[in-house]
Amino acid sequence: MRELGRRLAAVLRAGDLVLLTGELGAGKTTLTRGLGAGLAVRGDVTSPTFVIARVHPPLGEGPPLVHVDAYRLGGGLEEMEDLDLDVSLPESVVVVEWGEGRVEELTEDRLHVVIERASGDATGPGVDERVVRLTGVGPRWVGAELPTL
């Protein structure tokens, strides 16, 4: 998941909104750690579950990473207005865990990342396998080369 995040960071730019969907433990935060490494941002990327959002400034010329965890938020965009994501979006890469159905109104261009864990015995072969679907929505993503593992 980290390696996929690093590869994905290479195609992201300021103004991009990334929605991460997957069950608990699917790897959303791990993927975001890879994004942070690929974007070369300051600070450890950790789950912002209790603070809702963290901003990681760039170490160089790249965009900041705004990492949001909407798990504890029940409503849509109006409940997230206090986070000022609409203000942050133009100059940042904004990643929202559990964002589906909550923040799509921010922009017509967004990247949906759906992570599914392998099912079966939690200790057997394939326990760490993931299936990841990347779907670009809007003109920004038409013809974009999205990474695969």
Image (tube, helix red, strand yellow):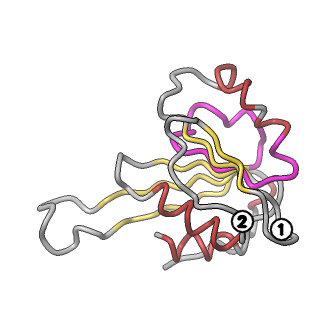
- The residue wearing badge 1 is 62
Q: Amino acid at mark 1?
A: Gly
Q: Which residue is mark 2?
A: 41
Q: Position of residue 126 (x, y in %)?
A: 22, 72
Q: Residue farthest to the front?
A: 43
As helix, strand or loop, the secondary structure at mark 2 comes to loop
- The three-letter code of the residue at mark 2 reads Val
- Residue 143 in which image quadrant: bottom right
Classify residue 112 as left or right of residue 108.
left
Magenta highlight on residue 104 = yes
Q: Tell me what residue is drawn at x 73 percent, y 71 percent.
A: 11
Region rendered in magenta: 88-109
Of tags 2 and 1, which is closer to the observer? 2
Q: Position of residue 24 (x, y in %)?
A: 35, 46
Q: Quadrant of residue 5?
A: bottom right
The reply to whether callout 2 and callout 1 are in contact (CB within 8 Å) is: yes
Is 9 rendered above or below residue 63? below
Up-down relation of residue 69 to residue 18 (above or below): above
